[in-house]
Amino acid sequence: MIIVQRLLGAVVGILFLLAALVFASIALGIALAVGVAVWAWLWWRARSLPRRRVIEGEYRDVTHLESVEDRRSRF
């Protein structure tokens, strides 16, 4: 009777160990998928940041001046 209990205890222990490994692998897979999705979302949001960078300095709009000069040259 004691041998049967020990054998049954070993089988149940192995089943619990396998169940824990299966649960851990599923949890790791879900965590990995969520991590990749968050990384992809952050990369997608940040990909246009270099194009929106503001370069400080002065500038002059010469389009209006050119059109005025063109009108003067016609007369």
Image (tube, rainbow, N blue to C red):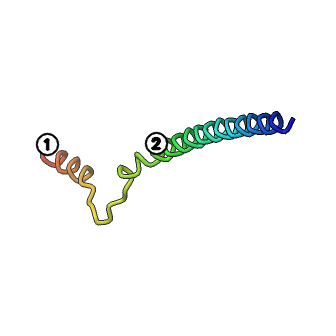
Q: Residues within 10 Å of mark 1 (few under 14, many from 20)?
A: few
Q: Position of residue 59 (x, y in %)?
A: 27, 61
Mark 1 — residue?
A: 74
Q: Residues within 10 Å of mark 2 (few under 14, many from 20)?
A: few
Which residue is found at the position 32% from the left and 61% from the top?
55
Left or right of 67 on screen, residue 52: right
Tell me the kind of residue under disc 2.
Trp
Q: Is residue 65 above or below residue 41?
A: below
Q: How many marks?
A: 2
Q: Position of residue 50 (x, y in %)?
A: 36, 52
Q: Quadrant of the C terminus?
A: top left
Q: Is residue 57 above or below residue 63?
A: below
Of label 2 and label 1, which has the lower sequence position? 2
The kind of secondary structure element at disc 2 is helix
Tell me the kind of residue under disc 1.
Arg
Which residue is found at the position 17% from the left and 50% from the top?
69
Q: Which mark is residue 33?
A: none
The kind of secondary structure element at disc 1 is helix
Q: Is residue 62 above or below residue 20?
A: below
Front-most of residues 47 and 68: 47
Mark 2 — residue?
A: 44
Which residue is found at the position 65% from the left and 35% from the top?
22
